[in-house]
Image (cartoon, helix red, strand yellow):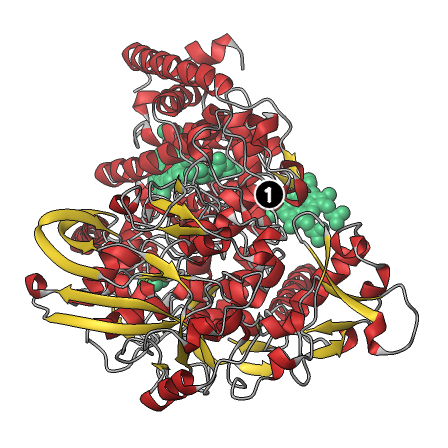
């Protein structure tokens, strides 16, 4: 008798556990799938030549620089924790969150960030340029 | 409740072995939740900053309501710390079952999550800087990093909808649930509520809360250190010197240290407490570090 | 904790807090705008306070459509004045913020991008010729911009000269840091596109913003140096001592910035009511994205583009035009009852011909229409120019194929070497550095120690000298830089320069200059080199040929 009650109790518990596990799995799959799509930024040829003429300029969360033959974009997201780095008065970039510093071409010089700012050559597409970062 | 609730001696009262501060903390939690509820009709996650501006300067006493909510939550943090110190000083840990104690310890990180998620709800330039930081920190959790990040911050980049639901829902609910369990009461007693309300109102009236400019509205000025909210400066300072996972490892360490206090005796207990004290000292030190760096 | 004293203390504190807050509350209520708070589809709290009719620029940039923050930045969501005005741009259009104002996404990013490359922004011709004149660089062609010159940590003597004298005229200059001739203009984009602020206007009406740029915007800068704005209006600048006592009669006028000038014959295009933008193309003014060093490299329009004979490929159907900006303007003006409509309608047909500047930019307001006679030869068409500011239609005379224009030996002459009636001459300029004085410094934005002093024995004017461009063409030239530089006070040397600058004086006369004015002129003075690589005065052989040529009867 009592073993039957035990068994029913186990059944309830097992079912509950399975239900929980299944829900967790489903949630996990959904969250996994929600990865953001890779980003492409399109820049007009003129914006790029202006940026180069000015010695580099911000464009959204990118920083566009020369040389004219091979323009490139730096991501302004700090490689430490993603704050937006700003042009420093002493040249290069500085991060306002934990003080990382980068040179004008994005190499890290100081602070907790380990990597250089991510950098990509712009690709020509028709009359515009595309940055994939 | 009525008048009698205010004159009745609160159950436990001064005779409570763990002191009054736990009840006062519950009072602050209730003021937070009530004032938060009062903010709900004015707040829109999709137009976070705009709706808060409208409340702050466009509604009669709106700035006061906001500040009441913020200061009661600061009050909660301060009294919770004081309450814990009181509990540890009086060695009343074992009033709670082991499970209830471990859950109570979790109230600490939960309080920080509630405060932080509230800060992000502002949607101003400072809040916009905080978002990617928290997102990257969550990503460094092994195995489940990205999932955790999306669970907490939502899957729409830059949107605070998910965070606002966690703030007012998940975190508030868990805080209340665990408090109710270990305080053995569903709501705070009337005196704690009144006292917490008066203290929050005094601060809210005297020291207005700020609201920053919209993100990206004006040219990004010369780089300096932008200070986060005061209760997280220790973490901001720590991240200057320590690797990123310390942002969740350090709280985990504190939870473990405090969690094991209940089962420990004598030298083990003392060691755990010294380590926890060192943890707090480091927090204070890192707060000083970031303040110095920002100067 | 829960006894009476705690309660009383807390009550007292809360009361105090409440008092402070009620003070704040009444202030808040007073400091909040009552007007509607929308502009376009956005929330703009700015317009809840800025309700006066004169605070509206009107037109396509009206307050109702754009609000204030689109151009002035600040915080458009804030209710109180102080916070709303945080981060304000008081000079919208200023190039340092243009990417966030005029050039923001959805407005004019392309134009803002081009202006950064415009010579009026870079001013690299001024910089490199100045350095060259001081003997600091071997050729007058460098890419250094005025911004570079102002940013140099240790200015050279020429750098110091630029900072103190020349660097107040460029599009990057803000209102508080400019040459006094251009004080009323806006900054950056607004220097041309926004009406000048005049001190006499008491209402401080919001100046309107538009694309019809009248000459007064150009005048400030271009009345300096080559002084083409003065010349075009028929004004010859003189030194104060030349008024009255001078050797030539002078109908004296005083310019807004105090300089004296004499009235002379204006340019025939001025007499016809034409403004600068009737000839000059958007690619010359706003730039076309290419960085150039000298003005004649930036300018695209030529006399021949309108008056003929057009260069090969200089006249194409509109369907062949590539320039996107011109196509957009044309489409817009075609839709609107605007200047193109005021011309004959055929000019706006899709395959109507257009004439182009030297780099392919069409001259939008030059239209070909059929004349009243209906034969099919090309002479049955007339070219007309529509004045952009008022829509008046002018006939454009085409260069006749006559003996005067086919004169042997004159093939290398540009139109303006014969058709320019006069050009200003500044043939004495003594420039010294006086360390004891102070002078405005455009790098510091305030007066600093040391001043460049300029002294001249007087200006004159007359038919221009002629010089030879690197491509062999003969063009008017100004003895523009006949100067003695004494930079010993700033560790520079003493230099004496006799430089010849190619220029379009903008003084087209009713009649071409006489043959005698060249063929009987005293031998042209000898000049060192030109202010451009390859530009020079006539060499000995050329001078001999000019003198030896028999004067034919006119
Ligand atoms: C949100 C934060 C917290 C609130 C609102 C809160 C609230 C309370 C309340 C209302 C009581 C009952 C006190 C009484 O009746 O006298 C209490 C008791 C207690 N709390 Fe907390 N508490 C919080 C955090 C914590 C934390 C973080 C710990 C430990 C890690 C903790 C440990 C205890 C203990 C051991 C007691 C004694 C229980 C007893 O005397 O029966 N509490 N707390
Ligand atoms: C029913 C529960 C709650 C609701 C509906 C709610 C709602 C809100 C809203 C709408 C905001 C944004 C308002 C603003 O920044 O002015 C906010 C901010 C905030 N909330 Fe809550 N909240 C609740 C509970 C809590 C709790 C329990 C805490 C603390 C433990 C808390 C702490 C904060 C903090 C620190 C802020 C940021 C204030 C600031 O610095 O601007 N909230 N909350
Ligand atoms: C920790 C507390 C809670 C959290 C974090 C939470 C979160 C959410 C979220 C994220 C949604 C939107 C889901 C969607 O539309 O896909 C939602 C919807 C909803 N929630 Fe909650 N919720 C909480 C508590 C509650 C409670 C206590 C109730 C009612 C007693 C409730 C009733 C509802 C209802 C009726 C909907 C609409 C569902 C639908 O029609 O799709 N929630 N909740
Ligand atoms: S996010 Fe840049 S230093 Fe931390």
**How many numbered discs sit on the rendered protein?**
1
Q: Nearer the viewer, residue B52 or C500?
A: C500
Left or right, residue C16 beside residue C471: left
Q: Nearer the viewer, residue B251 or C302?
A: C302
Q: Quadrant of ligand 4?
A: bottom left
Regarding residue B263, the answer to whether it shows in the image is no
* Residue located 28% across and 36% down the image: B82
- From this view, report whether residue B267 is shown above or below residue C145: above
Left or right, residue A5 beside residue C14: right
Regarding residue C182, the answer to whether it shows in the image is yes
Can you say which quadrant of the picture contains the C terminus of chain C? bottom right
| Label 1 beta carbon within 8 A of ligand 2 | no
* Residue located 67% across and 53% down the image: C388
Q: Nearer the viewer, residue C345 or A35?
A: C345
Can you say which quadrant of the picture contains the N terminus of chain C? top left
As helix, strand or loop, the secondary structure at mark 1 comes to: helix
Q: Position of residue B76 (x, y in %)?
A: 38, 35
């Amino acid at each position: 008798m009592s073993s039957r009650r035990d068994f029913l109790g186990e059944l309830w518990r097992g079912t509950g556990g399975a239900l929980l596990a299944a829900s967790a799995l489903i949630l996990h799959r959904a969250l996994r799938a929600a990865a953001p799509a890779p980003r492409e930024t399109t820049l007009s040829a003129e914006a790029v030549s202006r940026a180069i003429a000015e010695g580099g300029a911000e464009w959204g969360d990118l920083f566009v620089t020369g040389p004219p033959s091979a323009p490139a974009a730096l991501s302004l997201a700090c490689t430490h924790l993603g704050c937006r780095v700003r042009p420093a008065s002493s040249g290069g970039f500085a991060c306002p969150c934990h003080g990382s510093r980068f040179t004008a071409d994005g190499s890290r010089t100081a602070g907790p960030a380990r990597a250089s700012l991510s950098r990509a050559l712009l690709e020509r597409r028709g009359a515009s340029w595309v940055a994939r970062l | 409740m009525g008048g009698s609730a205010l004159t009745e001696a609160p159950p436990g009262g001064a005779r409570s072995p763990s002191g009054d501060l736990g009840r006062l903390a519950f009072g602050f939690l209730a003021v937070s939740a009530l004032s938060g509820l009062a903010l709900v009709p004015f707040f829109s996650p999709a137009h976070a900053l705009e709706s808060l501006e409208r409340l702050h300067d466009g509604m009669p006493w709106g700035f006061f309501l906001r500040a009441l909510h913020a200061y009661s939550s600061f009050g909660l943090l301060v009294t919770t710390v004081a309450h814990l110190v009181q509990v540890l000083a009086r060695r009343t840990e074992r009033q709670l079952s082991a499970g209830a104690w471990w859950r109570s310890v979790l109230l600490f990180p939960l309080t920080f999550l509630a405060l932080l998620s509230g800060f992000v709800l502002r949607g101003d330039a400072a809040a916009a800087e905080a978002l990617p930081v928290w997102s990257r920190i969550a990503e460094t959790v092994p195995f489940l990093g990205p999932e955790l990040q999306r669970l907490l911050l939502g899957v729409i980049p830059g949107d605070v909808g998910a965070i606002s639901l966690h703030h007012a829902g998940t975190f508030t609910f868990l805080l209340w649930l665990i408090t109710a369990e270990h305080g053995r009461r569903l709501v705070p007693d009337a005196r704690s509520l009144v006292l917490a309300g008066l203290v929050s109102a005094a601060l809210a009236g005297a020291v207005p809360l700020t609201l920053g400019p919209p993100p990206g509205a004006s040219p990004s000025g010369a780089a300096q250190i932008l200070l986060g909210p005061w209760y997280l400066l220790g973490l901001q300072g720590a991240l200057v010197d320590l690797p990123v996972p310390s942002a969740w490892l350090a709280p985990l360490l504190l939870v473990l240290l405090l969690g094991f206090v209940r089962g420990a005796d004598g030298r083990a207990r003392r060691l755990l407490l010294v380590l926890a004290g060192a943890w707090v000292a480091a927090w204070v030190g890192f707060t000083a570090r970031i303040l110095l760096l920002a100067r | 904790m829960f006894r009476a004293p705690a309660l009383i203390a807390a009550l007292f504190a809360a009361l105090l807090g409440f008092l402070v807050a009620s003070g704040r509350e009444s202030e808040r209520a007073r400091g909040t705008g009552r007007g509607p708070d929308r502009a376009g589809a956005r929330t703009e709290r700015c317009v809840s306070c800025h309700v006066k009719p004169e605070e509206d620029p009107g037109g396509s940039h009206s307050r109702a459509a754009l609000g204030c923050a689109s151009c002035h930045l600040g915080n458009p969501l804030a209710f109180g004045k102080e916070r709303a005005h945080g981060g304000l741009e008081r000079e919208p259009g200023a190039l340092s913020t243009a990417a966030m104002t005029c050039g923001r996404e959805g407005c004019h990013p392309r134009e803002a991008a081009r202006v950064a490359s415009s010579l009026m922004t870079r001013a690299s011709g001024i910089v490199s010729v100045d350095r060259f004149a001081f003997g600091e660089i071997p050729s007058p062609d460098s890419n250094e911009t005025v911004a570079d010159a102002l940013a140099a940590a240790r200015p050279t003597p020429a750098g110091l000269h630029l900072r103190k004298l020349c660097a107040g005229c460029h599009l990057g200059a803000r209102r508080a840091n400019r040459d006094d001739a251009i004080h009323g203009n806006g900054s950056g984009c607004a220097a041309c596109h926004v009406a000048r602020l005049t001190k006499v206007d008491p209402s401080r009406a919001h100046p309107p913003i538009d694309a019809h740029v009248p000459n007064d915007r150009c005048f400030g800068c271009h009345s300096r140096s080559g002084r083409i704005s003065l010349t075009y209006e028929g004004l010859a600048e003189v030194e104060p001592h030349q008024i009255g006592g001078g050797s030539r009669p002078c109908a004296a006028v005083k310019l807004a910035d105090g300089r004296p000038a004499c009235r002379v014959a204006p340019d025939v295009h001025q007499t016809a009511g034409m403004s600068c933008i009737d000839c000059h193309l958007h690619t010359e003014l706003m730039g076309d994205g290419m960085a150039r060093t000298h003005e004649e490299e930036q300018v695209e329009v030529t006399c021949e583009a309108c008056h003929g004979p057009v260069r090969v490929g200089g006249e194409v159907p509109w369907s062949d035009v590539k320039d996107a900006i011109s196509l957009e303007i044309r489409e817009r003006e075609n839709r609107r009852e605007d200047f193109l409509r005021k011309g004959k309608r055929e000019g706006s047909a899709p395959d109507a011909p257009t004439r182009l500047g030297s780099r392919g930019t069409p001259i939008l307001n030059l239209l070909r229409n059929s004349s009243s006679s209906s034969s099919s030869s090309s002479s049955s068409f007339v070219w007309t120019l529509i004045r952009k500011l008022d829509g008046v239609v002018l006939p454009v005379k085409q260069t006749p194929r006559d003996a005067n224009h086919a004169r042997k030996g004159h093939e290398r002459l540009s139109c303006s070497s014969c058709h320019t009636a006069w050009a200003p001459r500044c043939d004495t300029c003594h420039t010294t550095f006086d360390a004891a004085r102070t002078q405005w410094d455009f790098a510091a934005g305030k007066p600093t120690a040391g001043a460049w002093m300029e002294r001249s024995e007087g200006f004159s004017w007359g038919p221009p000298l002629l010089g030879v461009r690197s491509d062999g063409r003969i063009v008017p030239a100004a003895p523009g830089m006949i100067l003695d530089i004494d930079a010993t006070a700033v560790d520079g040397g003493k230099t004496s320069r006799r430089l010849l600058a190619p220029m379009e004086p903008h003084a087209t006369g009713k009649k071409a200059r006489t043959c005698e004015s060249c063929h009987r002129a005293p031998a042209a003075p000898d000049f060192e080199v030109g202010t451009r690589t390859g530009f020079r005065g006539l060499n000995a052989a050329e001078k001999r040929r000019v003198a030896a040529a028999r004067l034919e009867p006119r």
